[in-house]
Image (spheres, rainbow, N blue to C red):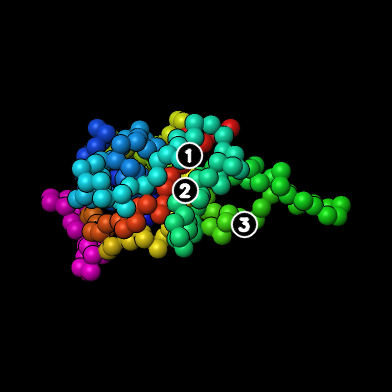
């Protein structure tokens, strides 16, 4: 269940782009869009939750930056571009505190900084054990959409998730890795207070006319971003 939710957290929760995910989480790709520009999966999101991004000019607060620089990098990540992306969501005292990318994306970020490393002594340890950029912690997540997203790999990875591509959409991106600049102060994750639907277990239920039993875990909740303008996504990152 945690794998399902981790993958859903990056996607969308509406019927758009030819994939009906209206019963899924309203994830980051839906939240971090301007209403007209396609995101990592080639889909634009004119609505966020019940709000329209396109009919009311005063709703810029629910629009995330997709330009200046363009969200679709369509190539390598450079230091000036990384700096520009980060600063494009800085408003006053509000700054991103978390950056999330794929394993490959983390390698590309390290390559950006590698030339800036300086060493002393004769025995060197290349690379980084931990990374921050302008105070933002950078983490790599195996569920983050990219060229090696696990929900499109072998069924042995995540069971039914690998087989349910039509319902879940495709997190495996052919055009490169994604990098998310997040101000976590504005991200909410809601879980039902009902004992059953707050990750409750039904117990084992017998089938009719045989001895097969099945048990189910239930979840009801959602994910929201109350300040999309303070976060953004970059995608299409590749060498």
Q: Which residue position is annotated with label 2? A: 88
x, y percent for residue 133: 58, 54
The residue labelled by disc 3 is: 130
* Label 1, label 3: how far apart the Cα atoms are: 26 Å
| Range shown magenta | 192-212
Q: Which mark is residue 58?
A: none
Left or right: where 38 falls relative to 70: left
Cα separation, mark 2 vs mark 3, equals 24 Å
User: Relative to the observer, which residue lies in front, 48 or 94?
Assistant: 94
Mark 1 and mark 2: Cα distance apart in space: 8 Å
Reading the chain from its start, which is encountered first: label 1 or label 2?
A: 1
Residue 78, quarter of the rendered image: top right
Instruction: Identify the mark nearer the N-term, 2 or 3.
Output: 2
Check whether the beta carbons of the residues at disc 1 and disc 2 lie within 8 A of each other: yes
Residue in view at x 20 percent, y 43 percent: 55
Q: Position of residue 51 (x, y in %)?
A: 21, 49
Q: Which corner quadrant of the image does residue 19 belong to? A: top left
Q: Position of residue 93 (x, y in %)?
A: 46, 63
């Amino acid at each position: 269940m945690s794998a399902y939710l981790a993958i859903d957290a990056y996607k969308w929760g509406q019927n758009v782009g030819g994939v009906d995910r209206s019963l899924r989480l309203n994830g980051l790709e839906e939240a971090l869009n301007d209403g007209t520009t396609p995101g990592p999966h080639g889909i634009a999101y004119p609505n966020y939750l019940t709000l329209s991004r396109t009919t009311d000019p005063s709703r810029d607060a629910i629009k995330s930056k997709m330009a200046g620089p363009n969200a679709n990098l369509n190539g390598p990540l450079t230091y000036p571009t990384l700096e520009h992306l980060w600063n494009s969501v800085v408003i006053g005292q509000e700054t991103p505190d978390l950056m999330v990318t794929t394993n490959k994306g983390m390698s590309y970020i390290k390559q950006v900084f590698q030339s800036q490393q300086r060493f002393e002594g004769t025995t060197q340890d290349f690379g980084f054990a931990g990374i921050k950029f302008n105070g933002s912690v950078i983490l790599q997540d195996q569920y983050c959409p990219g060229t090696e997203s696990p929900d499109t790999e072998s069924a042995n990875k995540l069971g039914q998730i690998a087989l349910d591509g039509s319902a879940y959409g495709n997190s495996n991106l052919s055009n490169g890795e994604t990098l998310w600049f997040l101000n976590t102060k504005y991200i909410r994750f809601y879980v039902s207070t009902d004992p059953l639907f707050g990750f409750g277990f039904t117990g084992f239920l017998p089938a009719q006319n045989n001895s097969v039993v099945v048990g189910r875990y239930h979840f009801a909740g959602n994910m929201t971003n109350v300040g999309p303008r303070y976060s953004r996504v970059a995608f299409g990152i590749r060498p």
